[in-house]
Image: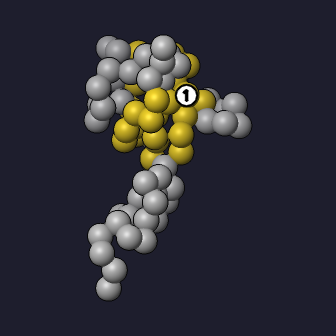
Amino acid sequence: MSAAGEDCGEDHCITCGDDGVPMAVVRVDRDRGLALCAPEDGSRQTVETALIEAVAPGDTLLVHAGTALARLGRAL
């Protein structure tokens, strides 16, 4: 048996095996706790942001299953 985290990268969910996807915040709806985000392919997806601090357009989030898990980069 390996040590915790040894088999997983930081962008990998150990619970279900799916990878987190880095996405750029395009627009924020603070009242609903949602952000419109875009991965590298340019598509758009609504993401729940309740698990992290307030986000702003231009931030980069790690998203898994439609939920932001972490901020990877902050907008300037």
Which residue, as the protein is rendered here, is positioned at the far right?
A: 41
Tell me what residue is drawn at x 71 percent, y 37 percent: 41
Residue occupying the far bottom of the picture = 1
Q: Position of residue 10 (x, y in %)?
A: 43, 54
What is the crowding at mark 1: few (fewer than 14 residues within 10 Å), some, or many (at least 20)? many
Q: Which residue is drawn at 52% across and 19% down?
A: 58
Q: In which quarter of the image is residue 40?
A: top right
Is 75 positioned to the left or the right of 48 in the image?
Answer: right
**Which image quarter is the N terminus in?**
bottom left
User: Looking at the picture, does residue 45 appear above or below residue 33?
Assistant: below
Residue 11 relative to residue 26: left or right: left
Q: Which of 23 and 33 is in front in this view?
A: 23
Asked if residue 13 is positioned above or below residue 76 in the image, the reply reads below
Q: Can residue 3 be seen in this view?
A: yes
Q: Quadrant of residue 42?
A: top right
Q: How many marks?
A: 1
- Pick the residue in front: 59 or 42: 59
Residue 24 falls in image quadrant: top right
The amino acid pointed to by label 1 is Ala
The image shows residue 32 at horizontal and vertical percentages of: 34, 20
Q: Which residue is drawn at 28% across and 35% down?
A: 51
Residue 30, position as x, y percentages in the image: 35, 15
**Can you identify the residue that label 1 sits on?**
24
Above or below, 75 relative to 4: above
